[in-house]
């Protein structure tokens, strides 16, 4: 429909009809206007798939038998792949599933930066680096929106903790906002042309994000030219007039008094009594009609989508395969050779626990979920005895959806109430009997694999963790097991870094994976047996201990009424590098079963500050594999303090044994600047810059210097 036709349609709407379109009419939908063939806008969570159907007015699942859906890898797992093509494929699956379930907007992706290892929702986000997140979120959104489904990039902005999320005031410098916390949102809006943005709960500069003229009108609309929908987080609007005056278009919440929402009857009354011009309502509805038109909701030519498509599971498996990070393989214990009659012992609650149905609004009623134990058993094949010991007793049993328990009200009904964010304690609950059984069994097996870490009792929306310590007294169990089996393979499954200091130096073989979706167990098994060569790299730094994490050293976390981002731009490796603090595992770290060499780095100066960097990568080992070439920029002469280096380009290259390829990395003028608060723009000063290429942020293998002759400024 042409713009003029949309304007005509807008003019035909009554005030009641317009008000009905800008607030929740059910928990996940707004009202349509049947007489004008405007359908309701149907939303659904979330980043890991299309959530099960809830009742219209109460937080009880309906309990359909047909709303089992694909369970996708978490955004942190996707980030660990560093694979922009897989991001696109993941987006296509997510959008196709949502459309197949009849939705118009999927409330994803989440792209808030991992500021602290304690944030309960880190698993839903893409790590600590704005460039990595920006490069992945664009194809992800493009994939989603190809299906005539709106993405909804969230939570805008500065929602980096769950404690007091609904009202905490974030104190962050403009420079940290621009260099760290906004870039992925800017890329989503200006490059991927995302059709919706979800306003966050928290406050910034004294205003709730969903009523912030600075974030919504100044930056999102004016600077970035965003024409899509701004939808509130559920319960994130607090004032009718402020909402009317700022560019929030739809108010959603967790209660069923829909007509009493701030942007419902109260806003209608404010218009009728002249407090608010009707044009303010028109502007909101205009954004909604614009998106509906883009989604072909008004002309009937709609993509049908499809959920649970068998063909998509191969793609999700590939993402899971590439999300597994090999942290240590000191004895070359991996890959495991399948031997007739061998006995593999798998230990740990996370080996047989389902995670799909947890985590908060990212929960998925999964069609199925291959756990690590099932994956190892399936991939081992017959004549290999795979036995299991729980080893530690986790608090609640993760479960694939139990059709009989849809009578349970969701946590979300009370998610905005006082105390809802009280973190789970990590009280040690060492279970001597379980541990002893595991230790005895470990003595007999040919191979011992421990799968532990966290679960969605700890990696969850609405709560942060109190510490990085592993729950369920896993440290003691791991140490007892390592005493009898120093060759034990350890798999940490977590959505955030955890404290491994109690045993990590004794562990020769260690892997990390986040919640990797319905084929996560298959992927782990394929990596362990070498059917897949691990290629994942950490999307965030793993500190040795929490007290060495920048938000907890220079800033505060989680704060109280206020939270101060005192570490400023020194988030993640930007801190560890610059302050010379050695982390346990560095950002971008991840090993392979083969070895790669990098050589012949060449830099070609292009137009302005743009440069092309070429590097030859060679697989000098005996197994096909993939390397992630990372390019970091260092500005050693800058007039202001900058991080020692910053990731500004990367590429993933797949090579057969002995094969070499020249890869190309591109730097633009935006690869060199820092944000100057006084000049309210980015500045790339003239002078010498060092370009460092390597396979991890702490392993730069080649460097070249370039000189910018003139200072460059950009927005
Ligand atoms: C929740 C979450 C948001 C989710 C929404 C709907 O509070 O913060 O990410 O999409 O409400 O469930």
Image (spheres, grey):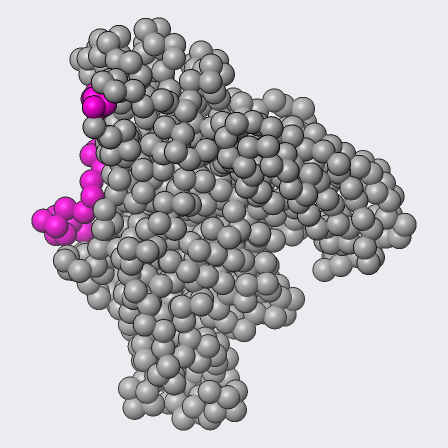
Q: Is residue 157 left or right of residue 493?
A: right
Question: Residue lying furthest right in this view?
Answer: 709
Q: Which of the two residues, 18 or 512, is positioned nearer the viewer here? A: 512
Look at 39% across and 74% down and name the residue there: 22
Measured as percent of width and height from the top left, residue 103 is found at: 32, 68
Measured as percent of width and height from the top left, residue 703 is found at: 76, 34
Residue 408 on the magenta segment? yes
Q: Is residue 65 left or right of residue 289?
A: left
Look at 31% across and 16% down and name the residue there: 447
Measured as percent of width and height from the top left, residue 39 is found at: 32, 80
Secondary structure that dominates the magenta span: loop
Q: Is residue 5 left or right of residue 531?
A: right
Quadrant housing the C terminus: bottom right
**Res 522 visible:** yes
Look at 57% across and 52% down and name the residue there: 134
**Res 556 visible:** no
Residue 663 on the magenta segment? no
Res 519 → quadrant: top left
Q: Which of the two residues, 449 or 711, is positioned nearer the viewer here? A: 449
Q: Which of the two residues, 669 or 81, is positioned nearer the viewer here? A: 81
161 versus 238 height, above or below: above
Magenta segment range? 383-412
Look at 74% across and 45% down and name the residue there: 613
- Number of marks: 0
Measured as percent of width and height from the top left, residue 29 is found at: 31, 69
Question: Residue lying furthest front in this view?
Answer: 658
Res 502 → quadrant: top left
């Amino acid at each position: 429909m042409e713009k003029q036709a949309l304007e005509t349609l807008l003019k035909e709407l009554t005030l009641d009809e317009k008000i009905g379109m800008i607030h929740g009419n059910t928990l996940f939908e707004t009202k349509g206007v049947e007489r004008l063939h405007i359908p309701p806008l149907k939303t659904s969570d979330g980043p890991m798939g299309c959530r099960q159907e809830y009742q219209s007015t109460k937080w009880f699942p309906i309990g359909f038998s047909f709303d089992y859906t694909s369970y996708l890898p978490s955004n942190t797992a996707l980030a660990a792949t560093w694979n922009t093509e897989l991001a696109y494929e993941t987006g296509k699956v997510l959008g196709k599933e949502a459309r197949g379930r009849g939705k118009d907007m999927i409330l994803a992706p989440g792209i808030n930066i991992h500021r602290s290892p304690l944030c309960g929702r880190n698993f839903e986000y893409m790590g600590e680096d704005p460039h990595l997140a920006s490069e992945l979120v664009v194809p992800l959104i493009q994939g989603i929106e190809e299906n005539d489904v709106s993405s909804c990039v969230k939570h805008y902005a500065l929602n980096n903790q769950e404690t007091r999320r609904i009202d905490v005031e974030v104190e962050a410098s403009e420079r940290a906002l621009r260099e760290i916390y906004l870039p992925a949102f800017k890329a989503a809006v200006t490059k991927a042309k995302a059709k919706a943005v979800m306003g966050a709960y928290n406050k910034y500069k004294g205003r709730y994000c969903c009523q912030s003229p600075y974030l919504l009108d100044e930056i999102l609309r004016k600077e970035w030219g965003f024409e899509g929908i701004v939808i509130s987080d559920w319960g994130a609007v607090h004032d009718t007039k402020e909402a009317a005056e700022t560019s929030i278009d739809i108010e959603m919440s967790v209660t069923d008094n829909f007509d009493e929402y701030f942007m419902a009857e109260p806003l209608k009354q404010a218009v009728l009594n002249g407090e608010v011009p009707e044009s303010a309502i028109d502007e909101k509805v205009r954004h909604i009609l614009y998106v509906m038109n883009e989604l072909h909701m008004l002309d009937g030519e709609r993509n049908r989508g499809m959920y649970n498509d068998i063909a998509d599971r191969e793609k999700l498996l590939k993402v899971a395969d590439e999300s597994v990070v090999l942290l240590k393989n000191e004895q070359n214990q991996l890959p495991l050779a399948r031997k007739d009659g061998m006995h593999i012992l798998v230990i740990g609650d996370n080996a047989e626990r389902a995670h799909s149905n947890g985590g908060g609004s990212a929960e998925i009623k999964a069609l199925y979920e291959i756990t690590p134990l099932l994956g190892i058993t399936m991939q081992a094949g017959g004549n290999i005895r795979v036995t299991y010991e729980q080893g530690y007793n986790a608090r609640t049993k993760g479960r694939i959806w139990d059709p009989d328990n849809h009578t349970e009200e969701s946590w979300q009904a009370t998610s905005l109430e006082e105390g809802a964010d009280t973190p789970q304690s990590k009280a040690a609950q060492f279970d001597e009997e379980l541990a002893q059984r595991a230790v005895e069994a470990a003595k007999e097996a040919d191979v011992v694999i421990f799968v532990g870490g966290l679960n969605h009792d700890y990696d969850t929306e609405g709560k942060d963790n109190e510490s990085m310590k592993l729950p369920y007294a896993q440290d003691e169990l791991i140490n007892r097991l390592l005493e009898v089996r120093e060759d034990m393979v350890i798999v940490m499954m977590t959505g955030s870094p955890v404290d491994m200091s109690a045993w990590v130096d004794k562990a020769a073989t260690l892997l990390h994976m986040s919640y990797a979706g319905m084929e996560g167990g298959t992927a782990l098994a394929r990596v362990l047996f070498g059917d897949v060569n691990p290629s994942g790299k950490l999307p965030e730094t793993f500190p040795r201990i929490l007290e060495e994490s920048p938000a907890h050293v220079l800033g505060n976390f989680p704060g109280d009424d206020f939270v101060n981002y005192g570490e400023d731009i020194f988030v993640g490796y930007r801190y560890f590098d610059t302050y010379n603090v050695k982390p346990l595992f560095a950002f971008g770290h991840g090993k392979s079963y083969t070895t790669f060499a990098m050589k012949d780095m060449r830099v070609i100066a292009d137009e302005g500050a743009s440069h092309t960097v070429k590097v030859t990568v060679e697989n000098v080992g005996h197994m096909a594999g993939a390397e992630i070439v990372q390019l970091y920029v260092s500005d050693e002469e800058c007039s202001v303090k900058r991080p020692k280096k910053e990731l500004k380009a990367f590429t993933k290259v797949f090579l057969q044994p002995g094969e070499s390829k020249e890869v190309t990395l591109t730097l633009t003028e935006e690869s060199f600047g820092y944000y100057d608060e006084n000049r309210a723009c980015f500045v790339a000063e003239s002078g010498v810059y060092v370009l460092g290429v390597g396979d991890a942020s702490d392993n730069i293998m080649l460097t070249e210097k370039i000189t910018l002759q003139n200072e460059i400024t950009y927005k």
